[in-house]
Image: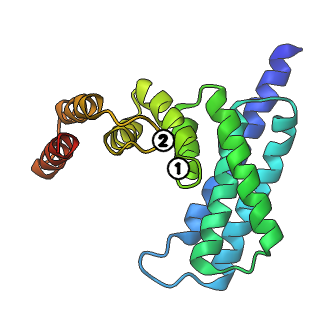
Amino acid sequence: MKNNSSNRRSELYKLALSEYNMHYVYLSSRGEVIDAENLDSAVKAIVRASKMLIPLIEEGYEESYFLYAQCHETLLNIEQRYDIGMSSDVTSECLKRMLEYYKKSADSGNIDAMYSYADSVSLHNPEEAAIYYGNAASNNHSRAKLKYAICLSEGRGVKKDQNTAGEIYMEIASNLEHGTGNNILKSRALYENAYR
């Protein structure tokens, strides 16, 4: 019985993920202007995915939290870019759900959610952002390492710590196995900036 429930959840999640990914198809214009029909189809795909995830969320299926947050963030991004006419109430609700479910997903151990949540709160709550960047960085999330190093070097949300920031910058630079010269130069510049 438990296995059937687990399979059902997994299948529903995969369907919701497929539906969510359809928005990329509708919005891939290859430099062309997105027409209203494709924009509407993209929004509808995201909303359908979001609705498919609700029963999973209600059952506490943690994998669904991150995708649910992504659905809401994507709707906000579409509204910002294309002005699809979302009311301020709908926009506020999307933002609230995005933050709530990125945090739930992050708190359940999703490293990408830790990063996304930190990015989402970084302007109005730098202390919490630094905590979540640090958690994702300690789990080897490369962009989180860079953002956490910046927090440390600038004292944004944490006590300023040039030495630790420099160590992280050096670690980032040493992990660039196939990086271009520009990436190495950028990491070096960040490292040098930490010691100014």
> Could you tell me which secondary element the residue under label 2 belongs to?
loop
Q: Earlier in the sequence, mark 1 or mark 2?
A: 1
Looking at the rendered structure, the kind of residue marked 1 is: Ser
Image position, residue 169 (x, y; %):
24, 36
Camera sees residue 178: yes
Q: Looking at the rendering, which quadrant does residue 191 occupy?
A: top left
Q: Which tag is nearer the camera, tag 1 or tag 2?
A: 2
In the rendered image, the vertical position of residue 36 relative to residue 193, given as above or below: below
According to the picture, the residue beneath numbered tag 2 turns out to be: 157
Question: Could you tell me how far apart the alpha carbons at marks 1 and 2 are, in whole angstroms?
Answer: 9 Å
Q: Are marks 1 and 2 in contact (CB under 8 Å)?
A: yes
Q: Looking at the rendering, which quadrant does residue 138 occupy?
A: top left
Report the residue at 62% width, 70% height from top: 78
Label 2 neighbour load within 10 Å: few <14, some 14-19, many 20+: some
Residue at the farthest front position: 159
Image position, residue 91 (x, y; %):
75, 67
In the visual, does 44 lie left or right of 103? right
> Could you tell me which secondary element the residue under label 1 belongs to?
loop
Report the residue at 77% width, 39% height from top: 12
Disc on res. 85: none
Label 1 neighbour load within 10 Å: few <14, some 14-19, many 20+: some
In the rendered image, the vertical position of residue 21 relative to residue 61, given as above or below: below
Instruction: Check the picture and name the quadrant holding the C terminus.
Output: top left
Looking at the rendered structure, the kind of residue marked 2 is: Gly
In the rendered image, the vertical position of residue 189 relative to residue 135, given as above or below: below
Image position, residue 79 (x, y; %):
65, 73
According to the picture, the residue beneath numbered tag 1 turns out to be: 122
Image position, residue 67 (x, y; %):
66, 44
Viewer-nearest residue: 53 or 8: 53
